[in-house]
Image (cartoon, helix red, strand yellow):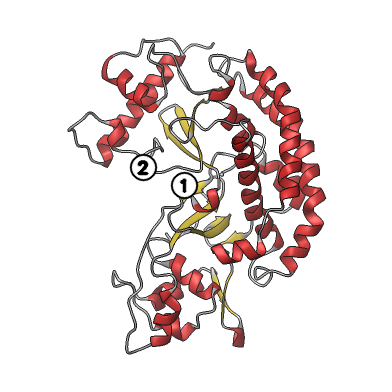
Amino acid sequence: MGHDAFAWRAGVSLVGALLACSAASCGAAESAAGIEHRDFEVKVISRGDNRPPINLAQTHGDRVLVLAKEGASESEIRGHRFADGTDAGTTLDTLLDHGFISREGSAGLSPTVAVMTLTAVSRDMPVDESVIAQTVEAIHAYAPAAFEALAGLEGFSHLTRGQYDLFLLSNGLLDNFQIANVEAQVIASERPARAGGHYYLSVQEKAAGAVGEAFGIYGNHTGRYGPYILGVYGNQRNQRTDFHRMPKALIGAGETADDSALQIRRRQLVDTLGALWFEQEEVVGEARQTLERLGFVSATGALMIPVITTANYGRFSAVVADFTPTLIAILNGHLPSLKARYADSSYAGEITFEEFFMWWFHLYYSAVTDALVADGTIHIPPQGVATYLMIPGDAGGSTR
């Protein structure tokens, strides 16, 4: 998910623990007991430098927000200290100062960001099967034309459809390349102004034992390496599958590397992919072995991921744009029932309808993607995520 400049930023999962009952407040411990072993992710929809000024996971702000969402009183929260020594009251003060929690008089504390617990999402943000089925049918009807349009396009023509259908049908038609259209044509609203800029912010609960990300939401994680941008798309972005996070898969057996060395290594590997695209060098030796292990090149050294360049971006965007009216019509048709659901939900007193809608939208397109995976229209790569290379106009090398 990040939309516009690929800025959907995935937060880092943190399984923290609250201390057990203290003499100061047994009530606080009772409220916290239910989240002691629960897992949360912090996620932001933003562009550019718009982002929260604090790390909610590192400061336990995510858990304080959950406690506020679930009705813990201010005195209960202030009577708590986290296992690492962080005072919950200090964290609460920070959240209050930044406007992430408000005081509602006698009603107590209220989060002003989307706190998506399993219970709240199940009750207040369900995605109707009818809207999933309607979107799946529309994509089934449109997919042949989309694939045909890209079949001869450099950046895609070297691949089979199954190697880029997740990138095209989910990231392209539903997610990253559509979100600006959805914001402009469905909710017609700017992203909310809050501490640090304009962005949507959520705390999302992961189900115990769940494989992948909270609620199975698909999203992007991109990184710039010199003139190139490498993107990772999916709902299983972790240290095993995400190029920007993985350590061990980037180095040889028995080797160790610190963060700085790993970043240099990533830059070298992406530079090699760029050189391969521009036909400046053959991928050989250890670099080829690593890129082959990652699934970025084949056993013969051929590129195995889609490439977006200034030359083909217009054509790719046109494919997305042709589907936009259909997507907008589906969403606008569902808007009245969604507004009614919001009005009756626990979120109505916490966040705007527009923010409620945008997080529901992520649940929606992820459910549609899962349905397309289930019926064989979309194939999940062996790595669990789709990786793609972007080559902006300022990248070196000859044109193709």
Residue 24 percent location from the top left of the image? 35, 89
Where residue 359 sits, quadrant-wise, is: bottom right
- The type of residue carrying mark 2 is Gln
Marker disc for residue 239: 2
Q: Residue at x 69, y 18 (%)?
A: 149
User: Residue at (66%, 57%) from the top-left corner?
Assistant: 126
Q: Is residue 123 left or right of residue 336?
A: left
Q: Residue 100's x, y, as percent?
A: 54, 68
Against 361, residue 193 (above or below) is below
Instruction: Decide which of 30, 273 is in the foreground and name it.
Output: 30
As displayed, is residue 289 above or below residue 168? above
Residue at x 55%, y 58% (from the top left corner): 201
Q: Which residue is mark 1?
A: 212
- Kind of residue at disc 1: Gly
- How much space separates mark 2 and mark 1, taking CA atoms? 11 Å
Q: Is residue 44 visible?
A: yes
